Image (spheres, coloured by chain):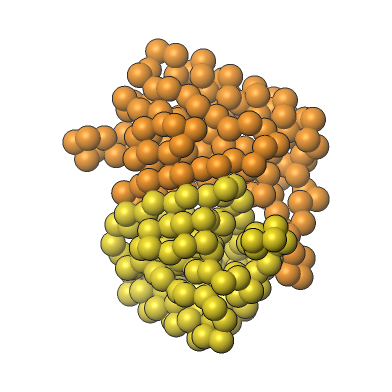
Chain colours: A orange, B yellow
Amino acid sequence: MSEKGAVTVARTVLQQCLRATLQIERGMVIYICFFKGATDDILPKMVSSLLNLRLCESDSGKMVSVAELPGSLLIVPQATLGGKCKGRAMQYHNNISKEDGLRLYGAFVSLCERELTAAAVTVKHGTYGNRQVLKLDTNGPYTHLMEF
Amino acid sequence: MSEKGAVTVARTVLQQCLRATLQIERGMVIYICFFKGATDDILPKMVSSLLNLRLCESDSGKMVSVAELPGSLLIVPQATLGGKCKGRAMQYHNNISKEDGLRLYGAFVSLCERELTAAAVTVKHGTYGNRQVLKLDTNGPYTHLMEF
């Protein structure tokens, strides 16, 4: 998590799901946005935090991490998370450049895949820069915000 | 939006949708969480900001506010948005008390309904303190974070 006073360089929103398309079954959805100043250095800590947080309900009702589920992880690039309102519109001046964002997003996805290789977890991910057609079923979206 | 240095007392996540259950059609979903220190004073500004931001795509592809849509607003109380990670678990120590949260949530919903009376917008809302079974279809969740 970003320390008090430190600059936030990435924002993620996490939701539990029963099903989400780009088709995954039970698991977790991560919406991710990188800000100006984000570098590869932060990725290992981000991935470790996000994959090990106990935010998923197992069949027995126990809260476990997505890595402990038989389940899936859906990663959705979501540049709109960097928006700040100006009047009635949103501006995205603090977002990372598209080039750097694409590179960091790719590295983030690869790192998640590597970390979850040994687990019974499938990683699916949206395409950076594309509109995501998303369907989500949840028994409590149980939405969390994590900043790095 | 909360000013730099000011204490954040409410956090909202907004998503565009084509359909969401608690059954609404095209419109917007607002997930809302109040923190310690939140009072009724902030509600008019919150509601005015959230309902007038141009975050919804109309049939013609133009970005309009939810108040300008023929559509619906789904409000979901989401206390998990106040979570901070401690080790591998989330803690919610900064959240408002359940009693005050329920009162503010009710007042927030009423104010949204009042503001949208003249518009062709239906307001649906989840029950405070209950698990929300949510299904969401979107053509781009287009997720935004607003803090107050």
Where residue B141 sits: x, y (%)?
A: 56, 49
Q: Quadrant of residue A57?
A: top left
Residue B139 position (above or below residue B16): above
Residue A68 in view: yes
Residue B148, how many percent across, how many down? 60, 68
Task: Name the quadrant of the N terminus of chain A.
Answer: top right
State the residue in front, B139 or A120. B139
Can residue B13 be spotted in the picture? no
On the rendered structure, is A122 left or right of B3? left
Task: Please determine whether, in this image, residue B107 is positioned above or below residue A134.
Answer: below
Q: Nearer the viewer, residue B118 or A95?
A: B118
The residue depicted at 77 percent of the width and 48 percent of the height is A94
Number of residue marks: 0
Task: Tell me residue B4's x, y (percent).
Answer: 71, 62
Above or below residue B27? Residue A118 is above
> What's the residue at 62%, 78% (across, down)?
B48
Q: Is residue A114 above or below residue B35?
A: above
Q: Find residue B7 and report its horizontal and vertical position in percent.
A: 60, 66
Q: Residue at x 44, y 32 (%)?
A: A23
In this rendered view, identify the residue nearer to me: B77 or A125.
A125
Residue farthest toward the top in the current orientation of the protein: A118
Quarter of the image for residue A9 reads: top right
Give the residue furthest to the front: B60
Q: Quadrant of residue B93?
A: bottom left
Question: What residue is drawn where x is 53% and y is 64%?
Answer: B27
